[in-house]
Every structure is written in structure tokens, then in C-alpha cells.
Amino acid sequence: MAEVVSLHPAPQTDWMAHAACKGQTHLFFPPHGEREEARLIREAKAAAVCRICPVVLECRDYARTNREQGWWGGENDDSRAAARRRALRAPQRVAVAAEA
Ligand code: SF4
């Protein structure tokens, strides 16, 4: 029998056991129809939790890699998308610098 090999290895999630946000899901995912002012307050509270979290880098990398939604690793959807765009442009900047 042939061995089945996954082309999509399971993401590493051991760091989640150390998350400072356990039990505070309401701060990290918006309720339906959330207004801008409420979002800013909720995200400020979530950011304060992330600032003391021992796994913030692992969390941020995980969310960027897996295109998560909500507040992860000190970032919301917009800041995560901006980080992905910067990362996509980064090799081009290195190539341009190498040509100069
Ligand atoms: S960095 Fe923030 S969202 Fe990520 S596990 Fe820690 S507290 Fe939760």
C-alpha cells in the first residue's frame, strides 16, 4: 500500500498553550455589525493583552501565514494584509539593491 504524504503539513500550534488571551475571545474577534468606534476600543484592549503575551511572535507569524481573521499577534486584518504586502515586495527591494 502506498504511503499517503500530506502536501500541507499541519501548522505548528504548540505556542497556543501559552497564549495570554485564553478566555477573552470577545476581544479578538469582532461581533457582527461592529461599529468603528467599538472596534477601536476592542482592538486597544486586545493589543494590551498581546503586549504581555509570551508567544506574540509565533502568533503573528501563524496568523500571517494562515491568513487568519480577527486580532492576532498585535495585528488586525488590515495590518496583517499590509505586512504580507511588504513581505512580497521585500525580495524585489533586495534585487534592486543588488543590481545597483
Ligand atoms: S499574541 Fe495576542 S492574540 Fe496572539 S496568543 Fe498572544 S494574546 Fe493571543
Image: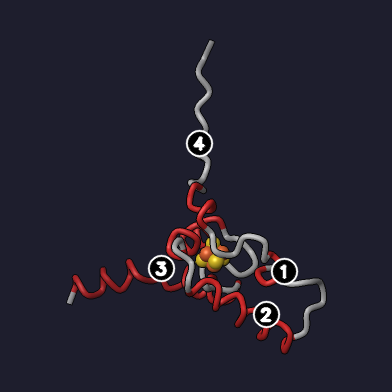
Disc with the residue nearer the chain's start (2 vs 3) = 2
**SS at badge 4:** loop
To which residue does mark 1 refer? Answer: 26
Residue 65 placement (x, y as % from top left): 50, 57
In the drawing, does residue 94 fall left or right of residue 2? left
> Is label 3 in contact with label 4 (beta carbons under 8 Å)?
no
With respect to residue 92, does 2 lie above or below?
above
* Pair 4/2: label in front: 2
Q: CA distance from mark 1 to mark 3?
A: 30 Å
Residue that sits furthest to the top in the current view: 1
To which residue does mark 4 refer? Answer: 7
| Quadrant of picture, ligand 1 | bottom right
Q: Residue at x 43, y 64 (%)?
A: 57
To which residue does mark 2 refer? Answer: 42
Quadrant of the snapshot with the C terminus: bottom left
Disc with the residue nearer the chain's start (1 vs 3) = 1
> Is label 4 in contact with label 1 (beta carbons under 8 Å)?
no
Residue 62 placement (x, y as % from top left): 50, 57
- Amino acid type for the residue under numbered disc 1: His
In the drawing, does residue 75 fall left or right of residue 92? right
Q: CA distance from mark 4 to mark 2?
A: 37 Å
To which residue does mark 3 refer? Answer: 87
> Is label 1 in contact with label 2 (beta carbons under 8 Å)?
yes
On the image, which quarter does residue 70 sit in? bottom right
**SS at badge 3:** helix
- Amino acid type for the residue under numbered disc 2: Arg
In the drawing, does residue 55 fall left or right of residue 97? right
With respect to residue 61, does 26 lie above or below?
below
Disc with the residue nearer the chain's start (1 vs 2) = 1
Q: Is 92 in front, or is 47?
A: 47
The circle on residue 44 is none
